[in-house]
Image (cartoon, coloured by chain):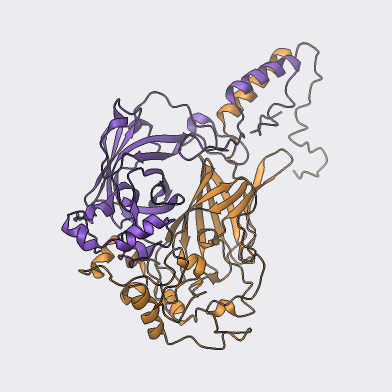
Amino acid sequence: MSPDAPGHRSPLESSPVQPPVRGASLLPAALMALAAVLYCAAAPAQVDLSGNWVAESLEDPVEHTDGSIPDMFAGLPLNDDGRQAGLTAPGDEMQELNRECQPWSAHYILIGPWGGRFAAVRNDQGHVIAWTLSSPAYDRLPMTIWMDGRAAPPPLALHTFEGFSSGRWQGATLVVNTSLLKDGYLEDNGLPSSNRETDVFFITRYGDELTILAVIRDPVYLEAPLVEGRTLKLLSGGSVTDDPILYCMPAETVPGFTDGYHSAIELPPREQRQQAFLTGLYHLPLIATLGGAQTMYPQFQQKLRSDQPPSQYCRLYCGRDEVLPGAPNIQTR
Amino acid sequence: MPLRRCAAERCGAKLVSAPAVLLVLALAAAFGSADAQAQRPRATGAPAGAPRAATQPARSARAQAPYDLTGYWVSLVTQNWRYRMVVPMRGDYAGIPVDPRAKRFADAWHPAADIAAGKQCEAYGAPSLMQVPERLHIGWQDEQTLRVETDAGMQTRLLHFGPAPSGAASLAPSLQGYSSAHWQLFALTNTFGAPEPMAHAPRYGSLVVVTDHLLPGLLRKNGVPYGADTRMTEYWQVQTLAPDQWLMISTEVDDPEYLTDPYVYDSIFQKEADGAQWHPGACSLSS
């Protein structure tokens, strides 16, 4: 029967409410109240994620602040297509004017330096129907994590940089499934991510700290899931960053190599870059820089083993404030 | 009127008569607020803003375990690869909040002296052990002690549950120190809509580990040091997407001697079916 059909009664109408009788309702009311309070005590509310969370663990500190190292893919489970896409990327294309404002995909929470702000969206009954994750950084779009069980749009629905995300609680962990992402970057050295990327985030709060375990799958560019973690710290106030560069503005990924509109000046040949950045600057063997799932595992060290630790002294992006003499001329941003 | 899951500020608001309010207030005071968000420092108990931890009966730590940590786990070195899979260049302190004393120490440090002195394992102390590319073999030594072995460096950590034994404060310092552990347990899956009965809900939780009584050692194989007063706090969690299972350990190293701020890093391990890839090897400062 249609809800609009004559004679239809909604479930709410099917049980007429009896008028209350003064005094007689005291005991049932008290019991109901007791049950309600006991229920609230036993059945936990959702973990409160609200607040500004700043990145506390900074994995790959150089790559995720000063800029990624061109052609450095070690530890990333790239397949052949991903490797070729990475190697053919100029690495400086994000300094092109039309790309400077391009947002990152959902996985930016793992690699961006800012962290983010969680806020709850509640319905009239006070239920959290969604969490939003936003950032003052211009290259991070607000991400909505739907908690009301709504189904994901079909695969051919609009793909966006923030994608579609749904969440559910497993104990104190918010499990977020993200899909419908737009083509983007996995790293800012030009390594791409496809619009078939899907992410699962396990977000767990420990007091004033938040851990995120992410499982990134991309059948186009990855041969295995990319699993990464991050720890964030709750700020009692203020913003997740004091950096004034929060808006879209021109920025050079490779200083001096731009005419302001596109990457008009080519980077040095790849072999030269690799020599300068990897073997020369960071003492990395070329076999490792090509990435692939094998580079994630400890046994890959057998292919790298050398008898002596490096004797060279780090001269660029070494956790020091100064650039020491002898650093290569080529610099990432 | 259906009994819905309720936010603390709304719970029972339309259900009670005046005497019941007093009852509600008394019980609410006893149970606290489900949404309360008190800030707590690291590793002092249940997460602020988190669900109330289920009451833990007097059972052994092994019986309380919300998931099975035992078995073999392999490092997934997807982050900090340059600092973990190869020996970083001398003077590369990026990512570690070293103070000037630590820089001076590391700048003057040469591995040959440590190798000659047989001190290679100083780079495998508890504060840095979980970021070494390795495999873990985890098992219960007894009902209250979790044993964590590594093939790289052949180290063993013992995670002690329950109250510290008398005299623990005077324990001799060691490379792996003394680790106190406890479970943070949560008994309910919280979803939008109808509540799940507590009795039928799966159990979830995390492991919190605090380690001290450490001997000095190295945070990195290029000489970045940590001191004897170092204290570290870890959160261990296991997450599953069948058929895969991952262990994430978030580690905070506090060292008043050599760090300006806590050094925080994350380690990811993947579950392995067996120990076929378990190859114990000695400590090394050259790989």
The correct choice, above or below, for A237 with respect to B27 in the image is below
Q: Quadrant of residue B192?
A: top right
Q: Colour of chain B?
A: purple
Quarter that holds the C terminus of chain B? bottom left
Q: Colour of chain A?
A: orange
Identify which residue is drawn at 45% across, 82% down: A329
Identify which residue is drawn at 42% across, 51% down: B259
The correct choice, above or below, for A227 with respect to A174 in the image is below
Quarter that holds the N terminus of chain B? top right
Residue A37 makes an appearance in the image: yes
In the image, A329 versus B139, the foreground residue is A329
Query: Residue B263 location, x and y as percent?
Result: 43, 52
Q: Is residue A50 left or right of residue A307?
A: right
In the image, B150 versus A127, the foreground residue is B150
Identify which residue is drawn at 36% across, 26% down: B59
In the image, B59 versus A189, the foreground residue is A189
Q: Is residue B122 left or right of residue B193?
A: left
Q: Is residue A306 left or right of residue A230?
A: left
Query: Residue A229 location, x and y as percent?
Result: 45, 55
Residue A32 makes an appearance in the image: no
Q: Quadrant of residue B88?
A: bottom left
Query: Residue B233 location, x and y as percent?
Result: 41, 43
